[in-house]
Amino acid sequence: MNSTAVSRAPITTGDSEVRLTEAKGRLPGWWKMPAALTFFALVSLLVFGIGGVRGQDSHFTIAHDSMFTSMGIPTEITVPSVPTAIVLSMVLLALAGFAWFMQATNRTWPRFAKPALQVGFGVLFAVAFLVWTVAAQSLNIEFLLKATLGLAVPLVFGALSGVLSERAGVINIAIEGQLLFGAFGAAVVGSMTGSPWIGMLAAPLVALVMGALLALFAVGYHVQQIIVGVVLNVLAVGLTSFFYGAVLKPQAERYNVPLRLPELRIPVLADIPLIGPMLFSQNILVYLMWVIVAVCTVALFRTRWGLRVRSVGEHPQAADTVGINVARTRWSNVLLGSAIAGLGGATLTVGTNVAFTQEISAGKGYIALAAMILGRYHPVGAAMAALFFAFATALQQNLGILSSSPLPAGVEKFTVPSEFLNMLPYIVTLLAVAGFVGRVRVPAADGKPYIK
């Protein structure tokens, strides 16, 4: 008996025992995140730093001529391309080394430390990339950020639609169709009335058709929800394409006139360099986006309604036991989400002065779905992920313009092929969701029909 007790005691002491415990406690795949960071840090060092254009500067316009210019705030920042990229790469390698240390020793990350490190790493890598690609040229950062926010609006509304539906246990693949119906409704109703405001109000009502069909089949008839969502997307493309060819295109002056919501400029705040035009000189849909993100966050996590919704998405049987109507909760959330997605669709037409065209949503619903997953089914997280994807799209557009601009005499540098630039938003989406999102906890009853 005694010998058995002794054999179970640890035979190591001090630091060796701690190291043994840590080695045994490592999670499977602990090395993947630091390995990915190391890879991208080395790419930054070898390509952006050592492989950069030597002897050239990168120019970044950060502010327009405004009241703050007289206060000494520079309108342009100029940095030496190669040294700046090398310094940024060294910082990236240091962050990767810190990640190796934390993961290899199985230490507990402080709250928000890991996502903060990943976000900071991504920002620094993007800056190093910009310094490299803008060498001997100039990039307007103010314009880039404003374009980012404009492109993010339909993605944020679509991602919020997914959050509301899936928190209640309904998989919402039909975001693409909801955006498409919203854009269609805003264009047609706005053109018929001559008012972009009425078109904007009509968009969520038209998108409700998609939401009602999704709820009817997924909640009412318990049809497999992913199949329903895909079918509804195909239905939306078919219907809008038919009406576009049969009605909107032949009678464009009556049913498909380009309209635009007016820009609401907030005095003084709109003159702030860099962030002023981006945040305080936008149309009503951008301001509504921020309000709806805040309202959804508070409603889902600080109210009785939100508790009921989350309980239905996690354990519908328990929710039903305490008197919560599971079907009604799921119906209402799907309809509310589709209406919000409709506002995102309105952004594609009356929000940007563009007439409706076939498949104008162009896959934004699926990117919004990825933003929802990357944001871990949280309104704020989904909005931040949507901004990240929108930045990739805005960067692709700006770099496309930059690559066609002439270089100074005697300067030669590698130009990113246009085909790669077109792939950039989707590559970023894949890398973010597959490589950096980690293990996302899906609502337990997501996609599972509830039958009494």
Image (cartoon, rainbow, N blue to C red):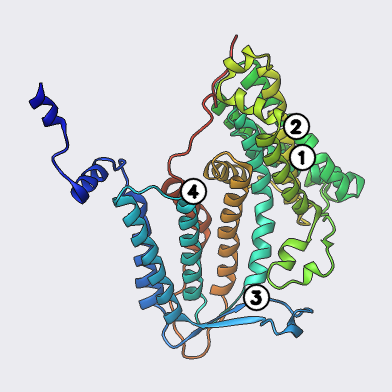
Q: Nearer the viewer, mark 1 or mark 2?
A: 2
Question: Are circles 2 and 4 on residues that touch, CB within 8 Å?
Answer: no
Question: Is residue 51 shown to the viewer in this render?
Answer: no
Residue 215, image x and y in percent?
67, 24
Rendered-image quadrant of the N terminus: top left
Q: Residue at x 67, y 69 (%)?
A: 143
Question: In the rendered structure, which amino acid carries the disc numbered 1?
Answer: Ala
> Mark 2 or mark 1, which is nearer the start of the sequence?
2
Secondary element under disc 4, as helix, strand or loop, is loop
Question: In the rendered structure, which amino acid carries the disc numbered 4?
Answer: Arg
Q: Which mark is residue 111?
A: 4
- What is the C-alpha distance between the residues marked 3 and 1? 46 Å
* In the image, residue 400 above or below residue 407: above
Question: Are circles 3 and 1 on residues that touch, CB within 8 Å?
Answer: no
- Say whether residue 14 is left or right of residue 424: left
Secondary element under disc 1, as helix, strand or loop, is helix
* In the image, residue 46 above or below residue 355: below
Q: Nearer the viewer, mark 2 or mark 4?
A: 4
- What is the C-alpha distance between the residues marked 2 and 4? 39 Å
> Mark 4 or mark 1, which is nearer the start of the sequence?
4
> Mark 4 or mark 2, which is nearer the start of the sequence?
4
Which of the 4 image quadrants contains residue 78? bottom right
Viewer-nearest residue: 394 or 436: 436
Question: Are circles 3 and 4 on residues that touch, CB within 8 Å?
Answer: no
| Residue labelled with disc 2 | 208
Question: In the rendered structure, which amino acid carries the disc numbered 3?
Answer: Ile
* In the image, residue 254 above or below residue 223: below
Which of the 4 image quadrants contains residue 342? top right
Q: Residue at x 57, y 74 (%)?
A: 402
Residue placed farthest to the top in the image?
452
- What is the C-alpha distance between the residues marked 3 and 4? 33 Å
Residue 97, image x and y in percent?
33, 61
